[in-house]
Image (cartoon, helix red, strand yellow):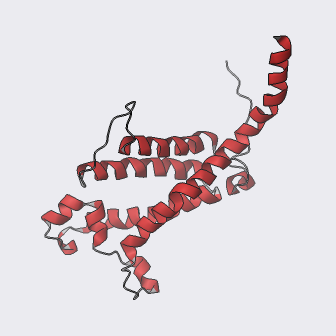
Amino acid sequence: MDRLTSLHATIFAPVERMGDHLIPLLARLVFAATLLRYYWNSAGTKVWDRKGEEGIFDFFTLESGTYAQMFPKAFEAAGYNTAKLGFVYDLVAYAGTYTEWLLPLLIVIGLFTRLAALGMIGFVVVQTFVDVTGHGGKPGILFDTRYELIDERTLWIFGLAILVIKGAGALSIDRLLGLNAGPRAVTVV
């Protein structure tokens, strides 16, 4: 038995040491592969009209569909007239739209990763709330046999939580700036 435990330690001790740098890097790569385009495409639908008439200033003008996506019931109550919604709706719509570009970009390049991942967790929670309350999405239940909205969003949040806890990992701007210098010994008093 001692040989087996010794062999196990010999094989997996280096893997465990690499994990502190590799797991966050892999979390960022998985985010880039699965959610980056999802969020960027979503933000794009809010500023580009897809009629082939896009210009540089479209980046600063929201499409009316933005309000249908973000505030479906309020937009309907306003008769689908954005002018009737008010300044707060505009502010939230612009902030949410640009957040869909900025936070994923920060995560992928590894800059202020912990804050960006924390912001994305908040974004996913709000997005899920809107999907359920505004669009009639069914959240589902954890620990059942179906894969539903709550299961999907829990997986997204888990990957982001790894980044909040561990930082950006290897190959990141955070590492270059000393914001994620790697694992340190923790002293328990």
Asked if residue 165 shows in the view, the reply is: yes
Left or right of 133 in this view: 44: right
Asked if residue 168 shows in the view, the reply is: no
Residue 115 vs 66, above or below: the answer is above
Left or right of 110 in this view: 54: left
Q: Residue at x 35, y 49 (%)?
A: 128
Residue 103 vs 156, above or below: the answer is below
State the count of labels.
Answer: 0
> Which image quadrant: the N terminus?
top right
Residue 148 sits in quarter = top left
Q: Residue furthest front?
A: 145
Q: Residue at x 36, y 78 (%)?
A: 61
Residue 132 vs 65, above or below: the answer is above
Q: Position of residue 24 (x, y in %)?
A: 65, 45
Q: Residue furthest top?
A: 1
Q: Position of residue 161 (x, y in %)?
A: 53, 41
Residue 134 sits in quarter = bottom left
Q: Position of residue 103 (x, y in %)?
A: 51, 58
Q: Position of residue 156 (x, y in %)?
A: 48, 46
Q: Residue at x 53, y 53 (%)?
A: 116
> Which image quadrant: the C terminus?
top right
